[in-house]
Image (tube, rainbow, N blue to C red):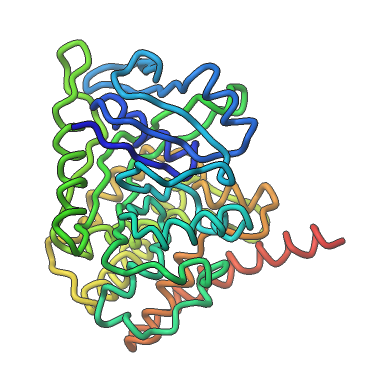
Amino acid sequence: MAYKILILGASYGALLGTKLLMAGHNVTLVCRSSTADLINAEGTELRLKLKGETEHRAIFSNDLPGHLDAIPPQDVALEGYDMVVLGMAEPQYAAPEIRALLGRIALAGLPCLSLMNMPPLPYLRRIPALATAALEDSFTDASVWTGFKPGAVTLCSPDPQAFRLPNEKSNVLVVGLPTNFKAARFETEAHNTILTTLAHDIDAVRLDGQDVPVKLRVYDSLFVPFAKWAMLLTGNYRCVQAQSVQSIRDAVHGDLEESAAIYAQVDRVVTALGAADGDAVPFEKYSRAAEGLLKPSSVARAIDGGVRDIERVDMLVQSIADGLGLSDPNFDMIVAAVSARIEANRRANAA
């Protein structure tokens, strides 16, 4: 059976979208009108290395068994869709046209799989220790999540790294780190049937007889997607410096002892919420992977480019840690550094 999947976001969301198209499912990308026109005219291109290969392969949506189209948010009709993928960065959901679409999605009761680093508030409400926690200040606009039933929202750790090239069209995406998406289950089996079927079908795809990287894995634990938090605070957010940015490799390996301490403290926070030992990724595995991450994180590049709002997982973890009695001065320094750069951007934009 071919499912019909609505993906909000045509950048990072196009990575999972391409994997779904390869598995024979149908995908609609929600994006700006200009990008939608380009995708509808030319399709998308994903550049991905297969295991053991040194060159990227170009995978074109027009050559795949699933059907792809793209549409601006105000034109979306929700009838016929089986699942929604939230593939935009958290601040983008505050835009009026996206906010309106989210409201309609919530009213329709469609299952939502989030690819955000920042977990949607309804997902956090599925965790007993956070069900009544005051976390709204970490969000650009927490009110956009009003109306969503927690059980219909799940989280997928966006571990694979993909990026657009500045000299290419916006329908081209390059995979830099072809790791797996790690999703927690929904609360209802009907929704889980869709999720596990998608995972199975993606797993079965072959290209010229070869396995294709970037799988969708489904876990019983709600905390597996939170394994990314330690990576984000140890590497991604520490790319942000007072006047510049640095690579993830330098952020992690510039002071490996401090990095290990930050990583361990985030793990303690997640464990205090209810995670098991097997839900985490060992620091040694992450630090080895970080050796090859030679660019600043996307959040650091965005701040360096002058944006006024970013996903604040650093603030979220700080807030949760404070509420659990696990405050950490390193968390405070990370949040302060990021907040100072954002505030400077806001002042510059207001001038």
Residue 232 image point, x, y percent: 40, 57
Q: Is residue 2 above or below residue 260?
A: above
Q: Residue at x 23, y 65 (%)?
A: 223
Number of numbered tags placed on the structure image: 0
Q: Position of residue 125 (x, y in %)?
A: 32, 75
The residue closer to the viewer here, 273 or 219, is 219
Q: Residue 18 appears at what percent x and percent y?
A: 35, 29
Residue 291 seen: no
Q: Is 190 left or right of 111, judged from the image as shown?
A: left
Is 318 positioned to the left or the right of 218 in the image? Answer: right
- Residue 90: x, y in percent? 50, 58
- Where is 287 relative to 23, above or below? below
Residue situated furthest right in the rendering: 351
Whether residue 69 sits left or right of residue 17 in the image: it is: right
Q: Residue at x 49, y 47 (%)?
A: 297
Residue at position x 37%, y 37% from top? 292
For the residue pair 269 and 210, the one nearer the viewer reads as 210
Q: Picture quarter containing residue 167?
A: top right
- Write the residue at 37% across / 61% down: 259
Q: Nearer the viewer, residue 98 or 239?
A: 98
The C terminus: image quadrant? bottom right
Image quarter hosting the N terminus: top left
- Please indicate, yes or no, whether residue 347 appears anywhere in the rendered image: yes
Return the residue found at the far top.
208
